[in-house]
């Protein structure tokens, strides 16, 4: 099939360059109501995407248009040629500054190992289920429902510049609802987990933590109106906060004037009193569903030091936007790793604070640094008593606060989403900020 598509692409003289990506996914799915299996399902899916590029000039400047078309495996040669022709026509309406496609590289491919390689996927599904429900033995609480997905993904990337790479990866995805009911209102908390290796402790520990959090939420009190106050952000919200530095160092956002970060300058401003940011990108993080030896353009990936002691070392980016900024492309790496800081979480809790473990909604502007979140679950410590709270909101500007920011020594690994991309975060489990505005409900 791929050879047929490539022959048709080569025969079309209106195409300047092309890229072909095939994903073959072997999927196992399990749907549960409480501990009972409601429905198991398996499937095999083949997706083929072709990107066609068409170059043209206007007023002495060179431009590149592109368009993506999907090619189902059942298409005839005539249907493939027609679909590609439509894609070429669509590409004439796209006007990007010219950029090259990556060429074949001799660099070694670095892949993350996974225990899922050692047995068929259907043998892992009962183990994943048992790990998730390991601590589901409370009288008033349980995992109300769960959906478990485990995929084996075989990817092939071929382009007109000589790239021809195939690799295999795994992606696991669990969505579950922790439920708790005593008297009055019934509490439900939603959790999403993503992984690429079997880690029983992580799966069972996360489920246990969510059950305990749902229990605590039963007896929450309204968040008090605290004004400007120290705030500790824990768990996945901490990843959402620190993701700001990943976005700020992206060549695409610099080119689009969303970020003003510059190499060799502090990304945290001057006079840093707290912990300094250290961030590397690594394409081969264990148990990350987005680990891959190459990016979607076929660029061979390698570990990159992006921020060191608060200073931006380099931009990271795809071939397109790196070319625009005249910097060496790193490729897109979706694993961000932050070093731990100088304080334990216990040390952070030594003074009055508002700690937040879950938001109903959290937003952070990559352009201004403004952030705001509605509190779903947290704890208020007045110096004597720790109280479970819910409701109200926090707001502030990270650019004004991150010179006095503290990162926990304790680390975590979790997912942080960025628009259409899934990111994997490895880093501090908690972030402490001062002078955050806390509005009560």
Image (tube, helix red, strand yellow):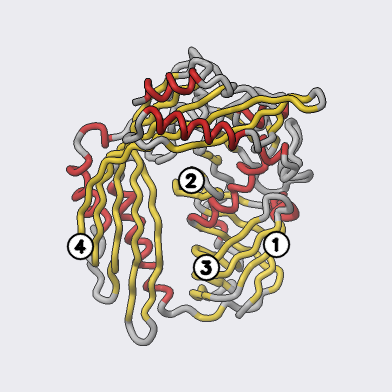
User: What label does residue 360 carry, if any?
Assistant: 3
Task: Tell me residue 316's x, y (percent).
Answer: 62, 32
Camera-near label (1 vs 3) is 3
User: What label does residue 396 carry, if any?
Assistant: 1
The residue nearer to you, when weighing 55 against 287, is 55
Sequence-first disc among 4 and 3:
4
Task: Answer whether labels 4 and 1 touch (C-beta < 8 Å).
Answer: no
3D distance between C-alphas at marks 2 and 3: 20 Å
Task: Tell me residue 414's x, y (percent).
Answer: 45, 49
Task: Answer whether labels 4 and 3 touch (C-beta < 8 Å).
Answer: no
Q: Which residue is mark 2?
A: 422
Q: Residue at x 34, y 49 (%)?
A: 202
Q: What secondary structure is marked by label 1?
A: strand
Sequence-first disc among 2 and 4:
4
Sequence-first disc among 2 and 1:
1
Q: Is residue 182 above or below residue 320?
A: below
**The N terminus appears in which quarter of the rendering?**
top left
3D distance between C-alphas at marks 1 and 3: 17 Å
How would you rate the neighbour count of disc 2 (Cα within 10 Å): few for under 14, some for 14-19, many for 20 or more?
Answer: some
3D distance between C-alphas at marks 2 and 4: 28 Å
Looking at the image, residue 218 sits to the left or right of residue 382; the answer is left
Camera-near label (4 vs 3) is 4
Residue pushed farthest right? 59
Q: What secondary structure is marked by label 2?
A: strand
User: What label does residue 51 carry, if any?
Assistant: none
Q: Which residue is mark 4?
A: 38
Camera-near label (4 vs 1) is 4
Task: Answer whether labels 2 and 1 touch (C-beta < 8 Å).
Answer: no
Residue pushed farthest top? 106
């Amino acid at each position: 099939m791929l050879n047929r598509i490539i022959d048709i692409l080569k025969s079309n003289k209106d195409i300047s360059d092309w890229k072909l990506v095939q994903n073959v996914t072997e999927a196992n799915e399990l749907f549960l109501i409480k501990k009972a299996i409601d429905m198991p399902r398996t499937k095999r899916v083949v997706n083929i995407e072709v990107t066609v590029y068409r170059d043209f000039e206007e007023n002495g400047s060179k431009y590149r248009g592109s368009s993506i078309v999907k090619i189902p495996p059942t298409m005839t040669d005539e249907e493939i040629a027609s679909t590609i022709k439509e894609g070429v026509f669509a590409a004439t309406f796209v006007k990007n500054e010219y950029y090259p496609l990556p060429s074949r590289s001799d660099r070694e491919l670095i892949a993350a190992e996974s225990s899922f390689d050692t047995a068929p996927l259907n043998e892992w599904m009962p183990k994943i289920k048992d790990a998730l429900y390991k601590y589901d033995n409370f009288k008033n609480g349980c995992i109300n429902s769960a959906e478990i997905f485990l995929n084996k993904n075989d990817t092939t990337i071929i382009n007109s510049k000589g790239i021809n790479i195939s690799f295999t990866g795994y992606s696991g995805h669990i969505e579950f609802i922790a439920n708790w009911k005593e008297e009055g209102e019934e509490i439900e908390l939603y959790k999403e987990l993503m992984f690429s290796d079997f880690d029983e402790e992580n799966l069972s520990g996360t489920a246990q933590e969510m059950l305990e959090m749902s229990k605590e939420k039963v007896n929450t009190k309204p968040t008090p109106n605290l004004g400007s106050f120290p705030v500790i952000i824990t768990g996945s919200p901490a990843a959402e906060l620190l993701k700001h530095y990943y976005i700020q160092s992206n060549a695409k956002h610099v080119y689009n004037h969303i970020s003003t970060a510059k190499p060799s300058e502090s990304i945290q401003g001057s006079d840093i009193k707290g912990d300094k940011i250290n961030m590397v990108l690594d394409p081969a993080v264990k148990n990350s569903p987005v680990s891959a030896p190459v990016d979607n353009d076929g660029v061979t990936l390698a570990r990159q030091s992006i921020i060191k002691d608060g200073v931006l070392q380099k931009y990271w980016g795809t071939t397109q936007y790196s070319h625009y900024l005249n910097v060496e492309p790193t490729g897109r790496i979706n694993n961000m790793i932050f070093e731990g800081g100088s304080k334990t979480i216990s040390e952070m809790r030594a003074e009055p604070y508002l700690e937040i473990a879950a938001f109903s909604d959290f937003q952070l502007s990559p352009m201004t640094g403004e952030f705001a979140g509605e509190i779903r679950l947290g704890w208020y410590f007045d110096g004597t008593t720790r109280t479970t709270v819910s409701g109200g909101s926090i707001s502030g500007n990270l650019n004004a606060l991150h010179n006095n920011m503290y990162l926990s020594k304790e680390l975590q690994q979790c997912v942080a989403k960025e628009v259409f991309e899934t990111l994997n975060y490895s880093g501090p489990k908690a972030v402490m900020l001062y002078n955050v505005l806390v509005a009560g409900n």
